[in-house]
Image (cartoon, rainbow, N blue to C red):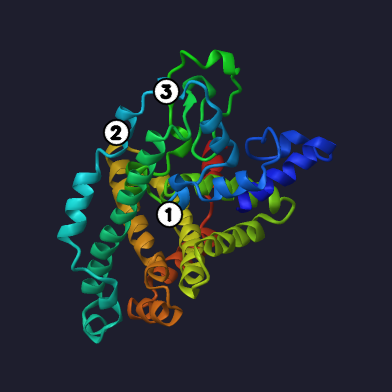
Amino acid sequence: MASIAFDVHFWHLREKEAENIKDLPGLPIKSLPSLFDFFSYGYCYCGLLSGPYFQYRVYRDMLDNPHTGQIAVLWPALKRLQWVPLLVGVSLSLSHYRSSFMTTSEFYDSSFVDKILFVLVHFIVFRFRFYIGWALAESACIIATLGAYPDQTKPRPGAGPTVALDDDNRKDCQYNFETVHNLNIYNIETGTSLRPAMRYWNMTVQWWLSAFIYRYWLRGLPNVIRLLLLFMVSAFWHGIRAGYYFSFMTTLISTLGQDRFLSNFSPYFRGSISSKVFHFIANFFAMRLYEYSSLGFILLDLGDSMTVTASLHYWGHIYAAAMIVLWLVLPSTKRIHEKKVN
């Protein structure tokens, strides 16, 4: 609903030429939506329950595309489902790891290592369920030809086509469904910081938040303030439970800390073997931070989130703070390199 409100606002701006239209994010709508269009878009079954997010223009393009019957959908839909059997199997085998256990005395009385291992396994189940849900949702969008654009238009998740193409040239094109591509499991699982995890998780919404909120709505503000407000908006997008806000603020701190970790130590691992070792270590810490930062998202209650975090000795906050302090204290590798050159 917020997206279509922006669309209508931008339509009026384009009509009045009140702003440089090149600076306006998103696909321009061709005409103002009627009340029926508004409700049809808002209650479209493809994105109603689990996403992915899609712009109103993408919805209209699905309805107005005269070549819909010629678009191949079966193989692209099945391709999005290729990992679902494995994900379902793992989720079912680990389904007894429930979040409610983290609020029991048995969890609090266990060792630090046992707590870390439990959070690790539980978060596997937690994110795998999202993987399954989004894979099914993406395949449903593909079957409906939602987000189908020719390869030549170079569509991106959420953004849609980035290169214009005349309708007359679309008949014999090869189509893809990158516009409704919401998840990149490999990049999430192998990233060395939390940024890939955020960038490739719920990609369509991430694009909207970045384009509409961070770059457009919050333009002109200092970057730190924009980043803080962006995380607050992202938390509000999910709901009003305090755990969401606790989780996203922890994610912000953890992201900054992991970025500093990479900045501090990656220059010392330039060899082929050592760089692989460092990548493994960085990925290990990134995934543990990902699990730690998601506790509020999982538990939702602020008291429970803080209690569980305290039982883990605030290790994620301490680690992030230590990396930031090291980044401030240690000389930058750029300056060291410049001294060696001179």
Label 2 environment density (alpha carbons within 10 Å; few <14, some 14–19, many ≥20): few
Eyeballing the image, is 300 above or below 211?
below
When asked about the image quadrant of residue 120, the answer is bottom left
Q: Is residue 115 left or right of residue 39?
A: left
Element under disc 1: loop
The kind of secondary structure element at disc 2 is helix
| Of pointers 1 and 2, the one earlier in the residue sequence | 1
> Which residue is drawn at the image coordinates 46% and 25% (left, top)?
68
Q: CA distance from mark 2 to mark 3?
A: 20 Å
> Which label belongs to residue 79?
2
Q: Which residue is mark 1?
A: 49
Residue 96 position, x and y percent, is 18, 68
Instruction: Give the distance between the C-alpha atoms of the residues marked 1 and 2, in whole angstroms.
Output: 22 Å
Which of label 1 and label 3 is nearer to you? Answer: 3
Q: Amino acid at mark 3?
A: Gly
Q: Quadrant of the C terminus?
A: top right
Q: Amino acid at mark 1?
A: Leu
- Residue 69's tag is 3
| Place of residue 208 in the rendered image (x, y in percent of width and height, measured from the top left) | 57, 47
Q: Earlier in the sequence, mark 1 or mark 3?
A: 1
